[in-house]
Every structure is written in C-alpha cells, then in structure tokens.
Image (cartoon, rainbow, N blue to C red):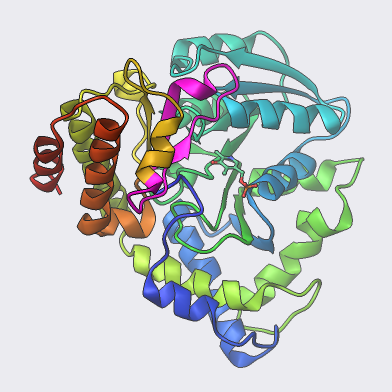
Amino acid sequence: MIPGPIEISPAVAEAAAAKPSSHVSAGLIEHFGSALERMRTVWKAGPEAQPMVIAGGGTLAMEIAVCNLLEPGDRALVVNTGYFGDRMAEMLDRRGVSVDQLRCEPGQAPSAEQIAQALDAANYRAVAVTHVDTSTGVRADVESVCRLARDRGVLSIVDGVCATAGERFEMQAWGADAYLTASQKAIGLPPGLALLVFSARAAERRASLTTKPPMTLDLHQWQPILAAYEARKPSYFSTPATTLIKALDVGLAEIGDIDAAVARHQQVADAMREGWSTLGLSLLPEEDLAANTLSAIRYPQGVGPELPKAVAARGVAVAGGLHPDLKTQYFRVGHMGYSARRPDHLLTTMRAVGEALGACGHSADVEGAVRAVASRI
Ligand SMILES: *Cc1c(COP(=O)(O)O)cnc(C)c1O
C-alpha cells in the first residue's frame, strides 16, 4: 500500500508475465493501438492529441515533456508543492531554462490567484505543476493552472504520476499541453512504462525548437511510430516493452469508465480519512487539498518512523515520509488503482496501522476505525 509501485490485478499480472511478443506481431499491434486509444479516453484528450508510450519511469516522462517543450533560453514557472516540484525545477535548469518557483509550505498549495499573479510576473514559455505531490499528499489546482496558462499563451506541463486515473483531469477541456504519468501508480501496472499525452500546441512547439531533444526522447521520432500503431500498422524506431504494452491495454480496460474510477478513488479516500481520524491521526495536507490517491499522515505524539516497520510486521507495506523538511514526522499510505477496488486491502491496511500504533504506544480505536472505513466503501 505504498504510493507506487502498487498492487496489480491478476489480469494485469498475467498479461505482464506473458512471453514477450515481437513488436510487429498482429497481437502486439492490436494491443498497442488499443492502449493508445484508451489513453485518449482516460486523459480525456481530443483526436488531435498525441499519446506516447515509452519504456521508463515517471522521471523519464518528466524529462520527455521538458525537452520537447522547452529549450535553453526559455523561462518557466514551477508551481512547487513538494519533492517532485523540486525535481522538475532541477530538470528544467539542466535543460538551460531559467526557472522561477511558486513555493509553499509542505501540506499547502498555491491558490489560483497566486498562480495567476505569478504567471503575469514574467514572460513564461511554460508552467509545470505536480497534480498530486506524492511527498505531501497534496492535490494542486491543475484545472486553474492549465486554464490560466492557456489564456496567457503559456504551455502547461502536468506531472500526473500519482494522479492519473484517480483524480479528475480533462486534457482537452482544460487545455493542458503535456500530461504525464508512469505505469506503477494509479494506472495499475508494474513499473516500466512512461506515459504521456501531448496537445497539438505542444507538437507545434516541438516543431519550432532550435535545440532538438535527444533522439530517443524526441516526440518527432515517435509520432509516426505511434500513429502507425494506432492505425494498426507495424512500425519500428526503438523496441517497445511488448509485455508491458499488452498489460497496459489490459490495465486501461480495467479502469473502465474514467469518471466512475475517479469517483471511486474519491469515495475510498474519504473513507480512509474517516478511519485515520478515528485512530486519532491527522493529515499533512490542509483539509480540502488532500489527494484521492494517497494519505500523508502525521505521526501522533511519541510515535515516529518505527511505525511503518510495525505496520510491515503485520503484513502491510506503507511508506515513510519523503519531503526533506519533515521526513521523520509523517508516513504515507497509497489507496489507488487495484487496491481502491479491493475493500479487503483497505480494511486490512486500516487494521494493521491501528494495531501498529498500539504496539508503538499510542492506543487507538482500531475496531472503530475499521468500521468507519467498512461503512463507507
Ligand atoms: C513517483 C513519481 C514520480 C517519479 O516516477 P518514477 O517512476 O519513480 O521515475 C514523479 N512524479 C510524481 C508525482 C511521482 O509520484
């Protein structure tokens, strides 16, 4: 129950464990084409958007977005809500981009007014935001970022690694330009795939770059390949991770109706928060900023990083803190993807955390917390 890699469904596990097929076999072509179509649905992206799948992780997806939309001399704004905002800022800096940051205290997120003001303060090529910062469990106001950017002719890059398929997102309606994720979080696959969707405006920006991206990360290299697969034709540029692409098609199909999937994540998050509160625990994020996909929970008085170990001793893996400023003051529990569809995973987790708290000297109403979750899922 860490916030990625998450538990995967039996069907996804079976697909990912199959013998690797050729990248030009009829079966793989069908799965690849179908997976790209399903990405458009999950992202709510229009027909002019370009989905991209490449072997790698979320960090690679961030790098691909950065080097296709920006080049040395550009200026960018990072709406920074934690650890992954810092990473984005460093990545932009390495690309030779001048970076300004709109920062906030851990657990908080800048308001739409602050974002608008920051965007108006300089001539930005792009703004980057983390949809859910996995280090703080904070959800940013991505709709406002994208709409404000679009109004000002600024490109938007959204890191959705801990959000996609668990948080509301509408690529086309909001006018986002690059929305990226990785396979091992709410998408529900093993680690190994970087997933992005680019807008038509992002593709135009790539066309106007004078400093090209590295060849393997270049949207222009991949566009004809991806278009061919979506048209169910064989193609080759660099060998795709064929077993994972099959698993991607299966996993995206399991997500089903995206609105229902997001609503389910919201329901599960509300239920888990009721459980934490019954255990006497408080969250790191401010009330209305807490994400659907994970909880970042403060240790109670007298308890510290021994708690995740005590939870592990009860058969459940949860994660420690990640934000550099307060690493030892909180822990994190993922509730996304397959586990969000498994009440037994959620209840076992609540019980394990409750019992571990007792073992660490903080007596808690374990039965009450389990009942609180059970009645809401
Ligand atoms: C996990 C994560 C990443 C990094 O993904 P990797 O696959 O570990 O490279 C980036 N951003 C966010 C918000 C994440 O949760």
Front in this rendered view, residue 293 or 131:
293
Residue 126: in sight, yes or no? no
Q: Is residue 282 left or right of residue 76?
A: left
Q: Quadrant of residue 63?
A: top right
Q: Residue 101 appears at what percent x and percent y?
A: 66, 16
Whereabouts is ligand 1, in terms of quadrant? top right
Q: Is residue 241 left or right of residue 237?
A: left
- Residue beneath the point at 58% across and 72% down: 244
Residue lying at the far bottom in this picture: please name it: 26
Q: Is residue 85 left or right of residue 219?
A: left
Front in this rendered view, residue 7 or 94:
7
| Numbered-mark total | 0
Give the extent of the magenta segment.
312-333
- Residue beneath the point at 88% across and 25% down: 73
- Residue beneath the point at 68% across and 45% down: 59
Q: Residue 264 appears at what percent x and percent y?
A: 25, 50
Q: Residue 335 appears at what percent x and percent y?
A: 34, 46
- Residue beneath the point at 66% across and 8% down: 121
Q: Quadrant of residue 350?
A: top left
Is 324 inside the magenta-drawn segment? yes
Front in this rendered view, residue 157 or 326:
326
Residue 357 sits above or below residue 15 on the image: above
Q: Residue 214 appears at what percent x and percent y?
A: 88, 51
Q: Is residue 177 left or right of residue 131?
A: right
Q: Quadrant of residue 151?
A: top right
Residue 159: in sight, yes or no? yes
Is 211 inside the magenta-drawn segment? no
